[in-house]
Amino acid sequence: MSAKRTPRALTGDDAVGEAMRQINPDVVPAYPITPQTEIMHHFAKYVANGEVDTELICVESEHSAMSAAVGASCAGARVMTATAANGLALMWEIVYIAASTRLPIVMNVVNRALSGPINIHCDHSDSMGCRDSGWIQIYSETAQEAYEHTMMAMRIAENHDVLLPVMVCQDGFITSHSVERVDVFEDEDIKKWVGEFVPKYTLLNTDNPHTVGPLDLYDYYFEHKRQQMDAMEKAKGVIKQVFSEFEKFSGKPFDFIESYRLDDADTAIVALSSSCGTIKDVVDDLREKGQKVGLLKIRVFRPFMPEMITTALKSCKGVAILDRSASFGGFGGPIFTEVRSAFHEWKEKPHIINYIYGLGGREFTIKHAHQVFNELEEVKKGNLGIKVRSLGSRE
Amino acid sequence: MSGESWKEIPIGGVIEKAGNSKEYKTGSWRSNRPIHVPDKCIHCMICWIVCPDCAVKAKDGNFSHFDYDYCKGCGNCAARCPKDAIVMKTELEAQKEDEK
Ligand code: SF4
Ligand code: SF4
């Protein structure tokens, strides 16, 4: 039997604030930045009302927020924080340190464009920029997913085979500020499901004093990086395990990817986050007209699952990868390069093109999804044309 | 590169044993070596005070010797000695003299 839940009308930010209240972390260092601010508005209220016993540290910048998160996590605390865009950029140095010090911090990133010119709306250039930082990255299509991913992130991060920080991403404004139905679990059930954090090391253990963050030169640094690669590898098994435990708890299946009507698809779109909802509508529409189209939603981008992705797309002759971030001077966006390279050994592979879209909150509508599926009709015949295209910009 | 495999060391650069800086022999950094000249020394112990690596060893309140396992050759002691009782030699020079 799956756990009891109550439907509520919440924004993505509300939903994450709610998840944090239910998790009741020991320490939350935070600094406000649009469109993440509302998460901390809610959470600060819970702290003030005594609904959680978290120590909320109001710091003077995101660099300090992540630094305080690192310190608290080294001390053995369960730590959460949230940020977006330039806030994440300011954290940068410490984002890497959190991962390499193997601290299971959970951070909600409300995806927003990086300045400049100044823009506060959605794209993925902030979190995509730190895809190599050693954080696990989970992308949410809806407020419901942002809520559920946050619960699961805590368990994944704190597993002793992993001990890596996790970024739970949702789309700025599109998800963070839109009210949706969110099914919220009971406080007690979540408390039990998330469980107690058992740190591997804690600086407060005076019986076994140890050093964290020492100088680590050419004689050991590489070995520590090798361990991080291994932890990401092990995270694959742990994420699978946590997904299946959450399925038992909630009755809802989760996987690294979501295949939407892909089984016999001729053409497909690969995307992350809220755009997937729009694409699903268009897939249904075109399917009704007899067109064999599908969607591959990537939920977990780090660790990346090449075999799973290529297998899901195996029936396709034409595939469009949608990247909501540009890699200036690169061969397409980050999702494109990785998916395309995952197909390298395949003899019969689909023709794959890339669309850079939605930068700075530029709308992605059903019109755009239709355009992509239309253009894929040519692409699937091998007429690739421009491999990296721009979708929705004024040409 | 010798040493343990990544599978054998603590994660995240954690050092599980306290007080281990002793095991880090900073003497390997040295390119200049302080040499004591006993005839000139008045045992004022200024060198002992200024050495950043506790590499000046005292005995009964007097200068005893340099601990070359940790002396990194910064030359602070020689610069501060009021009696020029410490001379800095290059390691190459000093090693050649050792061999004699
Ligand atoms: S500073 Fe010079 S004189 Fe004083 S104890 Fe050291 S070597 Fe001797
Ligand atoms: S050279 Fe530097 S490290 Fe060596 S004994 Fe003198 S002060 Fe100490």
Image (tube, coloured by chain):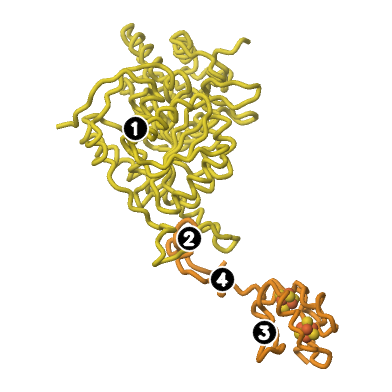
Chain colours: A yellow, B orange
Image quadrant holding the C terminus of chain A, namely: top right
Residue A30 in the image: x percent, y percent?
Answer: 49, 36
> Are dots 3 and 4 in contact, CB under 8 Å?
no
Indicate whether A57 appears above or below A286. below
Q: Which label was assigned to residue A39?
A: none
Give A299 or B32, whichever is nearer the viewer: B32
Marked residue nearer the N-terminal end (2 or 3): 2
Q: Which residue is label 1 attached to?
A: A19
| Mark 2 or 3: the one toward you | 3
Q: Which picture quadrant has residue A215?
A: bottom right
Q: Is mark 1 within 8 Å of ligand 2?
A: no
Q: Amino acid at mark 4?
A: Ser
Is circle 2 on the same chain as circle 3? yes
Q: Secondary structure at mark 1?
A: helix
Marks 2/3: CA–CA distance: 31 Å
Q: Which label was assigned to residue B21?
A: 4
Give A330 or A353, whichever is nearer the viewer: A330
Residue A253 visible, this angle: yes
Q: Which chain is mark 2 on?
A: B
Q: Is residue A362 left or right of residue B41?
A: left
Q: Amino acid at mark 1?
A: Ala
Q: Secondary structure at mark 3?
A: strand
Give A263 or B61, whichever is nearer the viewer: B61
Q: Which chain is mark 1 on?
A: A
Marks 4/1: CA–CA distance: 43 Å
